[in-house]
Amino acid sequence: MAEDYESMTVAQLKEALKELDLPVSGKKSDLIERLQEAAGADTTTEAVEEPVEEDAPAASDDSWDDEDWDDEGDEVYMVKQKPVLDEGTKAALSLRAAQKKKTPSFRRTEWFRYKRLSRSGWRAPHGMDNKQRRNYKYRGSLVRIGHGKVAAARFLHPSGFKEVMVQNLADLESIDPETEAARVGGTVGGRKRETIYARADELGIRVLNRRRDV
């Protein structure tokens, strides 16, 4: 069984652990060790269950189709790792989400007049007679220090992960899958992305901006 576990990816190992109601946190070596311990405890039950599957009646065409769909789903499985957070960080994230609902949308001056300005980000208004700078209500809100969010959740992804920019495979090795997630750089090509996605799945690292067409 040890050799079978070594050939499995982290995603497959976690699925096996979930079926046994075992924790899925840790590195690949920890997952393999956890499965080996469970297999050692259940060797007698496995020996009894295997012959029953051989004597089972042939499945119908409908059930065979369902199995095929499950296999296809495993091939395109994407890691959806969740972060390991303390109670304080969870409370900070929920508070930040509640505050964000009340935060106004900050638009650049004259964004409604020129299409190029509507596509650009925030810019501080200037000019002595600028209506937005003078706080005219119909001109939109200004970015102020009072709109700041919870400091404990600052720079964290909404999922709770700390984002780490990844440009190559070497950048993945220093990521802690329990608290950090990868964000692939925009200049990384499609072929290189495939290798990064595959390696991230092996390490159990979540990729925040995974492309579905790669």
Image (cartoon, rainbow, N blue to C red):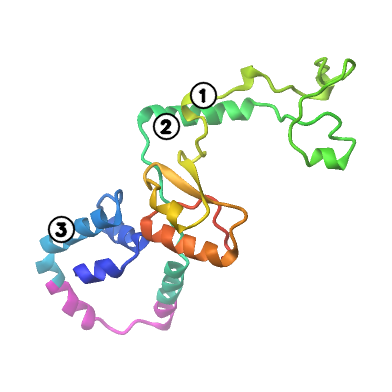
Number of numbered markers: 3
Residue 120 in the image: above or below residue 23: above
Q: Residues within 10 Å of mark 3 (few under 14, many from 20)?
A: few
Nearer-N-terminus badge (3/2) = 3
Q: Quadrant of residue 50?
A: bottom left
Visible residue check, residue 205: no
Q: Which residue is mark 2?
A: 90
- Magenta stretch bounds: 47-65
Mark 2 residue crowding within 10 angstroms, few (<14) / some (14–19) / many (20+): some
Q: Amino acid at mark 2?
A: Lys
* Residue on which disc 3 sits: 37
The image's mark for residue 130 is none
* Residue type, mark 3 in image: Glu
Q: CA distance from mark 1 to mark 2?
A: 12 Å
Q: Which residue is mark 1?
A: 150
N-terminal label among 1 and 2: 2
